[in-house]
Image (spheres, helix red, strand yellow):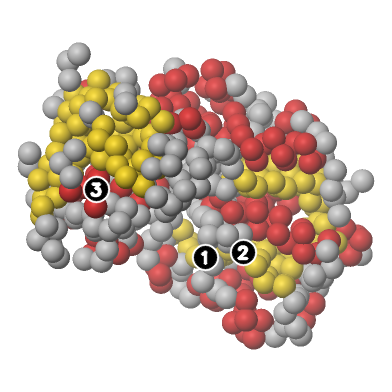
Amino acid sequence: MHGRSAVAGIGESTYYRRGESPHTEFQLACVAIRRAVEDAGLTLADVDGFVSYRDERNTPVRLARALGLKELRWAATPWGMGGNGMAAAVQIADAAVTAGSARHIVVFRALAQGEFGRYGQAGGSKGLHGGPMTGSLAWNGTYGILTPAHQCALQTARFMHDHAISQEALCEVALACYANAQRNPRALRYGHPLTREAYHASRWIVKPFHLYDCCPENDGAAAAVVTTVERARDLPHRPAVVLAAASGIGPPFGVFDRASLGSAHYRQVGKHLWEHAGCRPTDVQVAQFYENFTGQVLMALCEMGFAEPDGVEEFVSGGRLVGPDAAFPFNTSGGNLGEAYIHGFEMVNESVRQIRGDSTCQVKDVQRALVVAGPGYAPGSAVLFGAPT
Amino acid sequence: MTRVLGERWAVPTLDAHTRAFFTSGVLALQRCRRCAYIQHPPEDVCASCQGFDFDHFASAGIGRVESVAVVTQAVHPLLAEQVPYAIALVAVADAPGVLIAGNVVGREPDAVRIGDRVRVVFEDATDPHSGEALTIPQWVVTDA
């Protein structure tokens, strides 16, 4: 087990529906970072590193100037990843602080899609506006396979076919996220519960995905301060220790590979995470699974070792994911679907809250809290937080 | 045949990787000259022997639907009249390691199933820059 770094502080901006932020994306990033640093009992001058992911637009030197850092010693992102890099960003910060490359690294994600346009929409694809149709736009876009929803629907359809999984299993994931969000005043879906009837009545986006199977797109920022465990022990909050982190894929390495069709590409991540952590899925008290699409969550649950594909529908059904006393406490803040889609970073903060004991959906006696980043894309990543020993 | 997603829908840019697949009038898959490994989509390097030298294998284009989804919400104005349409991943019998993306025609989109037998057909299009004729592979459900 690793356990040499920890999250000492967390913060977030107010979360907004897409395009409704009154602030710029850079302002949102600065708010979340400032709050995380204050929560850690530090000052901005103590921060000496930044890590983000998903081609974060708010660059480290610009942040260092605006936030008044004394010096910047570390700046990195995992290679070209999307939401699948969320936990890998924590992994990079863990490596950097334990190597002594920096002392207090802020890991964060900020997005204001009103300001910069949407991620999940084909309109962002240059080739559809007279630019070149090359790479995956040629191979897939030519056929109208344009968005993450389209790609993930093809993976989910095969998984459902191979394991006799019904639409209800996807519905259960969405219902659990919305139900847990009803306890969380930060959540954009707070006060907006979802019923099974409303799920089934919602429009299809791409079958087998209804509207509620697809994450919304939101504006906001979330941040966490990573430092060494020794340093974190001197700070006000109970440290959320990074017990283990893993990222990777395959083989096979393709997103559409015949040998891994119907997969979220998380087998390798699961194998290495549990080996590194020296524990098993049953040793985890609470887990956050990035929902880009509900079907991908089902695959990731299996590949991370929590269920067998032929039993995953039963695993998620009958309210087994709902509330702090759930059989499997899951996405306790509401996740991407219920709390806010901050490319999953809100799940890092929720895991820290679970370790501290101050979640709005607090599970009893949390010793280990798991975060699994965006499934269906690669390299995937996951991080296991633990209570200090 | 006419284009599945309409005559105005975007066409692939022709380059070293795409030209054979989208213009040769057969299902042309990239094959390594050294080890005969077939890979799709094409790459600069053979994933089996790391060779750089390729030709193309003309598949008979007899295949099976490995996955299918039905796009119901248009994500581009040019597709507003085209939804619902079936998107699929197809494996062909004579190059079983690869998956080929495409649309499935000849059946209502909702009636296309994983396991359906399909054969390749080609839609005609024109490259707007060079005027070159394109033959874009598509898939039609066969009864057998």
Quarter of the figure with the C terminus of chain B:
top left
Which numbered circle lies on residue B20?
3
How many angstroms separate mark 1 from mark 3 (CA)?
33 Å
Quadrant of the rendered image containing residue A222: bottom right
Which numbered circle lies on residue A55?
1
Q: Are marks 1 and 3 on the same chain?
A: no
Quadrant of the rendered image containing residue A122: bottom left
Work out whether A243 lies above or below A73.
Answer: above
Q: Which residue has dot 2 on it?
A: A77
Residue B68 % position (x, y): 31, 30
> Dot 2 lies on which element?
loop
Q: How crowded is the residue under tag 2: few (<14 C-alpha within 10 Å), some, or many (20+)?
A: many
Residue B40 % position (x, y): 37, 41
Quarter of the figure with the N terminus of chain B:
top left
**Subunit of label 2:** A
Work out whether A172 lies above or below A224.
Answer: above
Amino acid type indicated by mark 1: Asp
Q: Are marks 2 and 3 on the same chain?
A: no
> Dot 3 lies on which element?
helix
